[in-house]
Image (cartoon, coloured by chain):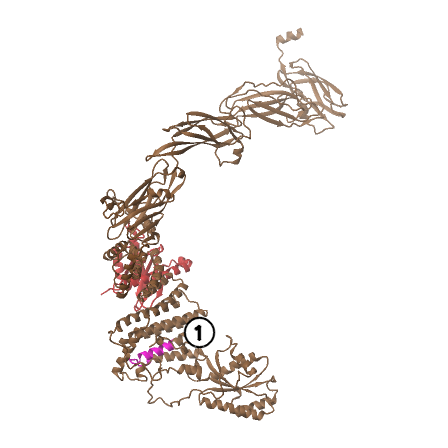
Amino acid sequence: MSPAQWDLPPELCCRPVAFVALTGLDVVYNAIHRAIWDAFCANRRADRVPISFKVLPGDNEYPKCRTKRTSYEWYIPKGILKTGWMNKHLNLVPALVVLFYELDWDDPQWKEKQSECATKVEIVRTSLQGRNTKVAVVLIQKKTPLPPGEDLVASERASALCGACDLSGKSLFVLPHTDHLVGYIIRSDFLFLNKHQFKMGFFSELKQDTQNALKYYRTAYSLVHELRAHETNMLEIKTMAGFINYKICRLCFQHNTPLDAIAQFRKHIDLCKKKIGSAELAFEHTAWMSKQFQSFGDLFDEAIKLGLTAIQTQNPGFYYQQAAYYAQERKQQVGQLCSHEPGVGYPAPDPLETTSGALDFYGQRPWRQGHQSIDPPDSEKEKQGILALQVKERDIPHSELIIALLSNAVAQFKKYKCPRMKSHLMVQMGEEYYHAKDYTKALKLLDYVMCDYRTERWWSLLTSILCTALKCSYLMGQVKDYITYSMELVGRASILPEEQKSRIEKNLIKVLMNEVPEPEPDCDPLSVKTAQSLWSDRISLAGSNEFTIEVQDYVPFVQCKAKFLSPSFHIDEPVQLHVYVRADCPHPVRFSKLCVSLSNQEYNQYCLLEDASKGKDILEPSTQENMCLVPGKTRKYCFKFVAKTEDVGKKIEITSVGLMLGRETARYVYLNWRGGWGDAASSHETLQACRSFKKRTRFPEQQVDWDTVTIQSSTMIISRVPKISVQLTHEPPALTNEMYCMIVTIQSGEDTVAKDIKLTAGLKPGQDANLTQSTQITLNGTEVCDDSHPALLPDIPLGDLHPGQKPLYIHCVSTGSRILLFHVAYSVSATVEGKDITCKCHKDETVTLETVVPYEVAMKFVSSKFEHLERVYVDIPFLLMMDILSASPWPIELVNSEVQLASSMNAIDQPQSQVEGVTLQTSECASECFLLKCPPVQNGTTFAGDHANIVIIVVIILAVNRHLPSYVLELPSFGRVRESLPVRYHLENRTGLVQDVEITVEPSDAFMFSGLKQVRMRILPGAEQEMLYNFYPLMAGYQVLPQLNINLLRFPNISNQLLRRFLPSRIFVKPQGRNGDTSIEAA
Amino acid sequence: MAVCIAVIAKENYPLYIRSVPTQGELKFHYTVHTSLDVVEEKISGVGKALADQRELYLGLLYPTEDYKVYGYMTNSKVKFVIVVDSSNTSLRDNEIRSMFRKLHNSFTDVMCNPFYNPGDPIQSKAFDSIVSTMMVQAF
């Protein structure tokens, strides 16, 4: 039997469409006919009813119709469905025959043509021989017909033609050959369709009325299962059930009811699952089951392509997967049922041979077609038949079938986001390839999915995959793969029992010794033989005996952790590095080399542990022990080296740790830990270990708890600790503008000479930019800095160190705190581990300096009466008062002060500093006072004061009123009680205008007075007026004088107050003593 | 009754798997592993809706020809998977739920054990015996 035995017949799988035969068309020679034919066939779009057309000659031979039985009595059916039946109805027997005939209604030879047409119809009828096929006539006309009812000739002749051809009016069509050909044709499509709906039987029903067809199929399906099933017809029933099920599911998908389809399929499977049939041909059942699932998967997939949406848990993949399972089961059964003795050959004569070369009915045995009784007619024939089937089954490439199904499923699961399912199926595919002895493909697939299981830490699954992969690599003689898989299978990720691990490890050691390993168990003996010769070839093969395995992709049986002892090392101490190695294989294992690669490869030579006795057969016991890894024990290897001075400030990283297993003389493999530690499982283990409550059980001396070893894969080389001290002597705070002195004292504690000392001093970079501009540094304190001095003095060479001091001056123009940096760099030679190195050392010292204002100067203008002045007046002298308030925390000595006057102002006498040489303590205040006068015209004053070596320039703009009268009062310095006191007021008009003045004198309790109490007068420009009063004091003491009010009538705005400033308001009145009397008398 | 019960860590590696010894252990491991696809899809797809309901039971993950796989996820994203024989039609959804609840309670007890390091495989006699009561008894 061919492998296609289980395939569904193509006529079942195609979407059945009605078969319509067109006759009377000459598509080869007649252009009009060709156009009509093309219109029928060429442009069939989705909007048109699916029909298959065929042009046939009018006298075509159709399959003969057998005489139908009138009753089923005595009828013993030979089978259910004949094999040719579907094809017959799809392609041979038309549902409708359409006769095309060229005839216009007004044809001159109407009569003749009518009878010719009738004859043609008759010929077609005869050739159909009683089949229930409809016949229709199409008249091809050259003229456009008139609307129905108007053309009387046409309707008359039409009915005549119908009568002549024995047709109903509905079966006559007129096809005018005009531009609207396609439109007409579409219309006629529908009409044809209506005709063949009458066709009897469920099969024809299916042609387009799918709903009804479905109904028929469902009935048919249940009927099939009602058939009496026994061993002989089981296959036939299942075949039919499969066909009908297929049809039902197909229609359900077509009706967009996928759930119905799935339900039907489930029902179908549940019903048929147990109908195994003949036990000797059990594989037939599984093959059939597999096919059921596969074809359902195909249907499902097809529906999806047409727009159905599937979901993760319900997609074609599951059906393909199940199909693959059944295919696998079938293969197993074949293994059990078809493993005949070698002598048993294919039976002759061939019991599967039939006379026609094909079966009459689906699902029947070739050697007993049409047989319907329970017992086989001939048991010998039956035996031969079964044997023939078994022998044939043996030759079927099962693995291929399984792999095809699995790969179908993989494609589906990939689409529906099932990565794990996909991996699982790929594992199965790999295993199937392994069984099919295609080890390369098997290994490729297994290797591909292995890492998924490894990263998800499903060790049980990984172990099983690795075992298969190991077998593959063994059978192919792939050394590297063999070593890799062995290493993982021996290690902690493997769940293999100890004896298996032990076996694999022994094999691994053999491979490393360049020997042939023992074969893996359960391998195909033939393949093992090939493998053994492959391995022997490998021994003689020179080269390619070195392998490197990047550990981070695997979980090998050796673990490694490398760490620097400290995150940083000073240049003058050796860098120390520990490498911890541990094996978890069943037997101790010896390695021949351990090397650490660092980011600076020059150090690699110091981090190397090698077989000292290379080439020698016997090792020194010490080395032997040292390089032997005992399972479960952690070994520690210490390395140290002296860093190079160029590496100061640089990071040294462990780029990798390599461990060499095997011997250079034989075969060896490098395990390479990138970054010095960690394989595919380490990070999780580290996490678990640090969560663990199992805190550090005490380990005996020399043993380390693996989990407690932390990783330090990089270290920093830092400069030597300087043995010098940098001291800063100064007295904060600094004053603004002061040349602030800081003394830097550098003292060396080095054993040898500190050479090339360089000091960098100044403002620490990275502060406010304003500070940079307002800070100046110099070494010369004798002169004041200006902007040309930098804020940071770099690399002041101090030469070799002789303990000493360096004064430094800082000039801060603005207040606020600033950070100053003092950086001392020098080099010194040192000896580390017997190596002389020159170390560069440096020491930084920073200090925060507060700058404050040393003193504040406040100025004010007062009148000669020490009254506050807002304005000064021309020619009227005033006082400039200056207060100097010390804010400095220590005494300041005022060296000098000076008033620099603008030209608009004159000093009345020589202005001399009155505070010269005065020392001010904190918050003490010194004042001085200058008498000044503004000459007319000028209106500005500049004042400048100078103190010590700090200069402040203050500019004060004074507004001067220029046009006011001046008043002068002549008043004695004191009065005496009851003694007349003459007072004279002078009024002078200095303005250019005539002034009207009103003068009133207010009475006072302390005085009686005589004189004008209220007067109005007019003073000419430049003129002067005198007023004389005689005051008579009544009381002693400081007494308020009678107040003189002056109103300038022309300037009502000028305040009385302003004028009064110049007038004394009080006078001291002495009491009248006895002695005084005498003196008065004397006077 | 279940034919396989598994506890899967948040990171999707197995903390505990037990299956009936009569059938291939490996097959169940694969079944449980592949069911994680559906679990992941369920928790990512309906993350919001699920979080609101506080529903831990994930329902039937997927049916295979022979088995039904049910899922449950704790708030700490530890998953429980129960595999039931397809032929066992007597088991209702409610019973599966109560099995999961029992399992969850027992798992909580395991987690409360100060000597248990979360993330390590579960080796607890109490948990074992709870699982045993839910497994199909092998004869």
Q: Chain of mark 1?
A: A
Magenta stretch, residue numbers: A226-245
Residue type, label 1: Gln
The answer to which of A666 and A77 lies nearer the viewer is A666
Q: Is residue A626 left or right of residue A185?
A: left
Name the residue located 35 percent from the left edge and 52 percent from the top edge. A552
The residue tagged with tag 1: helix, strand or loop?
Answer: helix
Q: Quadrant of the C terminus of chain A?
A: top right
Q: Which residue is mark 1?
A: A254
Please name the predominant secondary structure of the magenta segment in the image: helix
Q: Nearer the viewer, residue A386 or A512?
A: A512
Shade of chain B as shown in the rendered figure: red
Image spot of residue A577 (x, y percent) = 32, 42
Chain colored brown: A
Is A234 included in the stretch rendered in magenta? yes
Asked whether, in this view, residue A1080 is left or right of residue A660, the answer is right
Q: Residue at x 41, y 27 (%)?
A: A801
From the top left corner, tell me how far across and down residue A866 is, in percent: 61, 21
